[in-house]
Amino acid sequence: MKKIINDPSTVVEESLRGMASAHPDLIRVQLDPAVVVRADAPVSRKVAIISGGGAGHEPMHGGFVGKGMLDAACPGHVFTSPTPDQVQAALAMTDGGVGALLIVKNYTGDVLNFETAAELAEADGVEVRTVVIDDDVAVTDSLYTAGRRGVGGTLLLEKIVGAAAERGVDLDGCEALARKVVAQVRSMGLALASGIVPHAGVPSFTLADDEIELGIGIHGEPGRRRVPLGTADEMVKSLLDPILEDLPFAEGDRVLLFTNSMGGTPLIELYLAHGIAERLLAERGVVVERRLVGPFVTSLEMQGMSLTLLKLDDELVDLWDAPVHTAALRWGV
Amino acid sequence: MKKIINDPSTVVEESLRGMASAHPDLIRVQLDPAVVVRADAPVSRKVAIISGGGAGHEPMHGGFVGKGMLDAACPGHVFTSPTPDQVQAALAMTDGGVGALLIVKNYTGDVLNFETAAELAEADGVEVRTVVIDDDVAVTDSLYTAGRRGVGGTLLLEKIVGAAAERGVDLDGCEALARKVVAQVRSMGLALASGIVPHAGVPSFTLADDEIELGIGIHGEPGRRRVPLGTADEMVKSLLDPILEDLPFAEGDRVLLFTNSMGGTPLIELYLAHGIAERLLAERGVVVERRLVGPFVTSLEMQGMSLTLLKLDDELVDLWDAPVHTAALRWGV
Amino acid sequence: MRAASQVLEEHRVELSTLDREIGDGDHGENMNRGFGALVTALERDAPDSPGGVLKLAATTLISKVGGAAGPLYGTAFLRAATAVKDAAELDADLVAKALRAALDGVVARGKAELGDKTMVDALLPAVRAAEEAAGRGEDVPTLLKAAAEAAAEGADSTVLLVARKGRASYLGERSVGHLDPGARSTSLLLRTFADVASGVR
Amino acid sequence: MRAASQVLEEHRVELSTLDREIGDGDHGENMNRGFGALVTALERDAPDSPGGVLKLAATTLISKVGGAAGPLYGTAFLRAATAVKDAAELDADLVAKALRAALDGVVARGKAELGDKTMVDALLPAVRAAEEAAGRGEDVPTLLKAAAEAAAEGADSTVLLVARKGRASYLGERSVGHLDPGARSTSLLLRTFADVASGVR
Ligand SMILES: Nc1ncnc2c1ncn2[C@@H]1O[C@H](COP(=O)(O)OP(=O)(O)O)[C@@H](O)[C@H]1O
Ligand SMILES: Nc1ncnc2c1ncn2[C@@H]1O[C@H](COP(=O)(O)OP(=O)(O)O)[C@@H](O)[C@H]1O
Ligand SMILES: [Mg+2]
Ligand SMILES: [Mg+2]
Ligand SMILES: [Mg+2]
Ligand SMILES: [Mg+2]
């Protein structure tokens, strides 16, 4: 394993220190328990938007902390959900007196840990709501699975709800908005090569030279199936088709298209893929009104990409365009 | 070779198409000859700032085209300098009537091609100045080499000169400023693993499991020497020491620290390395006043990083902070 | 607990490897981190009752393990602590009750049923074996031995199952053929408790 | 030119591999792209004088090759075109003059000297051999054969040299032991021109 690290067991902590030194104007970082909060937290009379999850998906979530997005992020160990005491600390550090919304990706570990924290916080009298995001169409959503995973759609959810909270929307409003976004967003990813978890030291999975994993998760969990490596046209279509069918997205729909690198896929390939996705959507009559292209919801240095589509309306466009100032997303300010 | 591409020979063109569709508000893309120009070009009475170079370093340079930075970028084939006709087209598309500054990274191919274009343009009556950036301390600068390479410092140069041009500084002023930045910026990089050039299909170089290439270039050109893989502390120090000695940077100096991923190194490692660099600089009494962390000057999916230090004064801080609106860098707008 | 920590340390790589096959490869790391922290906590200030130790285990695991296993094992120990109250010594009946309470806690939190390929597949047979042993009037070492054997068998049975809960469920049919890491760690813990009770460790 | 394009196509991988060893691995790709475009341009509208063909070669290579080789070969062909003016046929003297002009152009642009491990190490000996042959009154095929042989030798000599120009110079001593790709492509081009002139191709 070759990584720029000192010791697998201190990677997250050291990385958080570096993040703190890189963005002193944006965030404060607490190490035990680990929490990243916006520099001006708590913001009085503002609903606190809190998220978190295992590390290894950077810039998610720490890079989304700041004005117009998250009040706090709770980073777990690499690919391991954070613990309830982290969430409790985040709640305490961001409490503006009007409640908090927890944005939780649908993994058993994340759900259980945030759930425990929410119970403990409610016992302390803080009003806490939880919204679980499960946008990954690769997983069959049935009684026989843990349900769909939260992947790329998480960023869009955090941006949009964060903008609403910044404008003073109350807890009920933020929760309703979050549920609306969850209902309208779908994603799917693929991997060409695995990343390496520092404490594991070996690739999470191995693929032959001519195969890809379709429907991959962001922790290297296997996907729907392994398929032969195809052209970019074929790969993008294999991501887009299941997304379009699922909601379904129809001709005339206005959408935000988010083309995401899993980390190791370079931007030259990502833009190429984005162009194909735009072309395929145009052919279907789906109107791409906003886009985001880059490595935002990653899986260490995994090579691969994901596509996320969010059905837009005027409210969502307006909130997407609202100013945001975080380490990873910044505009209007 | 596993890549999200259709055909090695159309990668750059298809990627540019995707980029155009991703940023319709920012840029226009012409394909033959290939040029990326800001959407509102030409800007009357503004010095045109033009750069370019081989593709494969994204977001450099196309991602730096826009308000407050570049007027145009000329992307060559992967790792191949652009041709003079591209530069001529860029000059024509951005001519605001007050001349153009070409920012050229110091590679024989880039220098020769831009030089040819400048000669042709002058013959057409356009006033063109050229500034060559050669910030890579890994290369010995002597009569016996092609001189130092242009690497991470290029971004800082383009941002700062772009800001000046946007404010209406004239060609002489832009050129003088550019030379000042070139004189005050130094970089060095290392690689853990090579990327793959699409038309080559195999890694540009191979390193053993326990070695890194110190002083690597952004095209996978070999560096100063191969050394054993060390800890992050050791690796960061091995980049920082030669940079600090070279200018030299002294106690009390104000600097911008740019911690750059070569593409395949994930953000979690990059922030970790950034934190170490900040600590080492603090120990030396060098004052980090501005920072940039991310994959900005890359070498496809190469794993590795580079550090760039720019000596700051009030003028440079002010120009760095000035609004910029491009695909890769955006603030204040 | 010290012994448990040691066993988990020894099996760290095994558990993570099992988890890499059908999960995300961190189960060994998570358990090892949690029990390591527990040993440190016990060294600093050991509670004097079994219930106190169980409660400390619960809070430590909840705040140090993370993942799915953290809250599940945390709840299990918390419920077990509640079940044994402030008893100074644990007899067979109390141990059986504590195990039952632990199982109920895991099921309440995780909603897994027998056959879903989770730690429940190890814990549930263990609880049944413990209750039978208690009914037969066995002593604690014998009871724990029976529970550990049942857990081991239960864990082994997960190889053939399709996962329906947790991360492995994303795999569907492809999860068949792999031992569930959480069932394996439950079986390891019970084996260790049995060994300690009978003086083997 | 068609033959040159074919030869470069055949040697594309070889040249890029040489370039990967001490450069950035694109020389074969660059040359192949340039000469491919030249063939297309010639097919579309072939100039009727040798000078016209050389000039078309120059502009096409400049706009299609990129890298260091593009402007260098472009300049070489441009200067050669100027040297032969509008001659309808090229005799030995004119060919020698064209080669000398090409060399001067490459040196003016690239500032490389003999021994810097560049295409100059193939081109300079070739020019000398051509001038000697012209002095001896040889015909064009013989002259080009002599030039090609000298270029091949010159190219081979680069193996032992330390690069002082171009991308390979970053390597310093580590460039020793590798053939310079640009010298190799120069040698290939001259060999092809010789073969065509003597009717071998
Ligand atoms: N809903 C559930 N109920 C009971 N046990 C579960 C449930 N989900 C997961 N588990 C157990 O947790 C184990 C995985 O733990 P761990 O790897 O630490 O967490 P994560 O899956 O979050 O990485 C599984 O092997 C399984 O035994
Ligand atoms: N200054 C120079 N003078 C003459 N030839 C040069 C010079 N610099 C480079 N070359 C030649 O160019 C060749 C490399 O060409 P190519 O790979 O196409 O360009 P690049 O180095 O830009 O990738 C070298 O092998 C060398 O022969
Ligand atoms: Mg996990
Ligand atoms: Mg090149
Ligand atoms: Mg796991
Ligand atoms: Mg080359």
Image (cartoon, coloured by chain):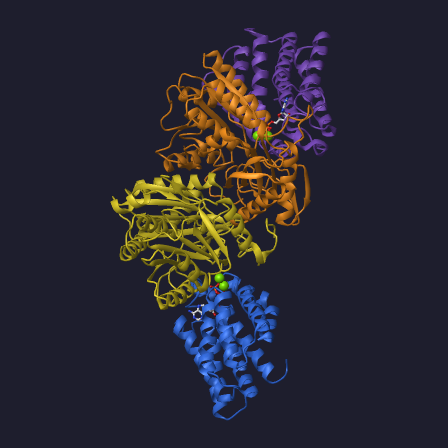
Chain colours: A yellow, B orange, C blue, D purple
Frontmost residue, C185 versus B273: B273
Q: Quadrant of residue D150?
A: top right
Residue A313 in picture, x, y percent from top left: 26, 46
**Res B242 visible:** yes
Frontmost residue, C182 versus D9: C182
Q: How many marks?
A: 0
Residue A123 in picture, x, y percent from top left: 36, 68
Q: Residue at x 36, y 47 (%)?
A: A68
Q: Quadrant of residue A127?
A: bottom left
Residue C92 in picture, x, y percent from top left: 51, 88
Q: Residue at x 49, y 15 (%)?
A: B120
Quick check: D131 left or right of C28?
right
Residue D42 in picture, x, y percent from top left: 49, 19
Quick check: A254 left or right of A26?
left
Looking at the image, the residue that sits furthest to the bottom is C137
Quick check: D152 left or right of D196?
right
Frontmost residue, D138 versus B260: B260
Q: In the displayed structure, would residue A156 be above or below residue D45? A: below
Q: In the displayed structure, would residue D75 be above or below residue B293? A: above
**Res A242 visible:** no
Q: Quadrant of the C terminus of chain A?
A: top left
